[in-house]
Image: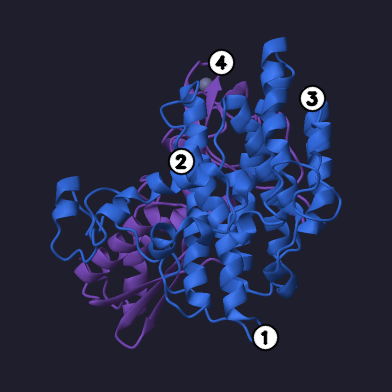
Chain colours: A blue, B purple
Amino acid sequence: MGFDTAYEAISEESDSGHRWAFGTGFTDPLAGVDTAVPAGIDGADLAAYCLMLGDDALILSHRLQQWLARAPELEEETALANIALDLLGQARLLLTRAGRADGSDRTEDDYAFDRTEREFRNVRMAEVTDVDFAGLIARLLVFSTWRLALLGRLRESADPVLAAVAAQGVNELTYHRDYAAGWTIRLGDGTDYSRQRMQAGLAAVAPLAAELFVPSAVEQRLAGVAVNPEDLRPEWDAVLAQVLAAAGLDWPEAGWPEAAGGSGGSSPRGGTVGKAGRDGVHTEAMGYLLAELQSVARALPEATW
Amino acid sequence: MVTTLGETTLARARRVARSVPDPELPMLTIADLGILREVAIAGTRVVVSVTPTFSGCPAIAEIRADLAGRLAAAGFADVEVRTVLSPPWTSDFISPEGRRKLTEAGIAPPRSRSEVAAGPVPLTLTAAGPRLECPVCGSADTVRTAAFGGTACKDLYRCRACFEPFEHVKEI
Ligand SMILES: [Zn+2]
């Protein structure tokens, strides 16, 4: 190839893909990667774990994409688009890994577009809507601090594919967390009004934080492959404390994650009879999000683009 | 396609693969960028291994197509492009030649990364970003204006000496 014009590139007959514009010829993101499940690891559990981490990334990415054309400044819009793209890339790798691990050979699209709400395994923090930009920043701070701690440990996973996805993701999440921390400090240490909005953002996200640290049955069975989310608390606590101190903000007392026990703790949004996102139990926001995310694929099931 | 006299099949395949430009940083080849990991011959098949810069890099599909196309034009009908995830790409893989080409194009190249420790990643709370040399005038009086740029691998800077804005390839 090596085309002189874009038209030549998209009209090239030898092109076996279905490209109509730059970047649309999406191919298998794990093409050529050895995706054999290592001995001693249960493929179905591994697939379920990949879906959890993949769904977290996919769903938050979609929420971030909804901010495009709504962000307060062009630079912030670009930042949110970049973060969304990183997370979408992680989701593509993880969902593809899931389909290989359980032998079903389902593709990333099968998982993203053909599952019902109860089949999604993301933490509910990924799916909720944001009241304002400060609310988004609070959520991004809490989520990316948690995911960075998680991926940092996942680099040691007994599954080489998960370990490689995590190693790449650590570099990306480092930027996401720094971005959220920077804005938390600007808003918290800004005017009285910006501080109030930032504090309100933390109050909105706090009740959903407990769920991040509750190990699911799958994670417990996958010791050495998966990260036990209970182990993430010290790092998460330390980073949150550092950022909030610099911002002059307080973590909402009532919403502080419980040290142990059910995923809900004392929070009214902590879960439904002990079940939450990892069990497929979601908030009202999730149905609306999926309706939008899946609308084109459901209307045109055979379409390629 | 000119064939250098005496060039082996492998050397020719390697030369063609190394010439593929990166779609987002077209002044660099994929060899300059350090994402071309290996070119090998297996029977009549050319096996090219590439690694994505970012998990969500949309350019990787274009690179795969371009590799297959250029190698086909050079007489290699059977081409397999493999994705390699480990070790992950970092900006340290950009060659000295690649860094020179970036500067020539007005883009500040990445500095070498500090060693990645195994433990928790430290938080960075300074918004200004690393001090860079302006690729236009060479002044060190530069400031970061945005941590995320037009592509995933770059951020935005401004020079306070010559007032030119410029892009910088992130240390990642
Ligand atoms: Zn300058």
Q: Is mark 4 within 8 Å of ligand 1?
A: yes
The residue at 57%/65% (across/down) is A50
Circle 3: is it few (<14), some (14-19), or many (20+) Cα within 10 Å? many
Residue labelled with disc 4? B161
Q: Which residue is mark 3?
A: A249
Which chain hosts label 4?
Answer: B
Disc 1 with disc 2 on a shared chain: no
Give SS at disc 3.
loop
Within-10-Å neighbours for mark 1: few <14, some 14–19, many 20+? few
Instruction: Give the quadrant of the C terminus of chain A.
Output: bottom left
How far apart, in angstroms, are the residues tagged by discs 4 and 3? 37 Å
Foreground: disc 4 or disc 1: 1
* Disc 1 target residue: A40
Q: Residues within 10 Å of mark 4 (few under 14, many from 20)?
A: few
- Is residue B143 shown above or below A49? above
Q: Position of residue A14 (x, y in %)?
A: 16, 66
Mark 2 residue crowding within 10 angstroms, few (<14) / some (14–19) / many (20+)? many
Q: Nearer the viewer, mark 4 or mark 3?
A: 3
Instruction: Compare residues A282 and A219 and report the one nearer the observer.
Output: A282
Q: Secondary structure at mark 4?
A: loop
Q: Is residue B55 left or right of residue A199?
A: left
Disc 2 residue type? Leu
Q: For mark 2, give the secondary structure.
A: helix
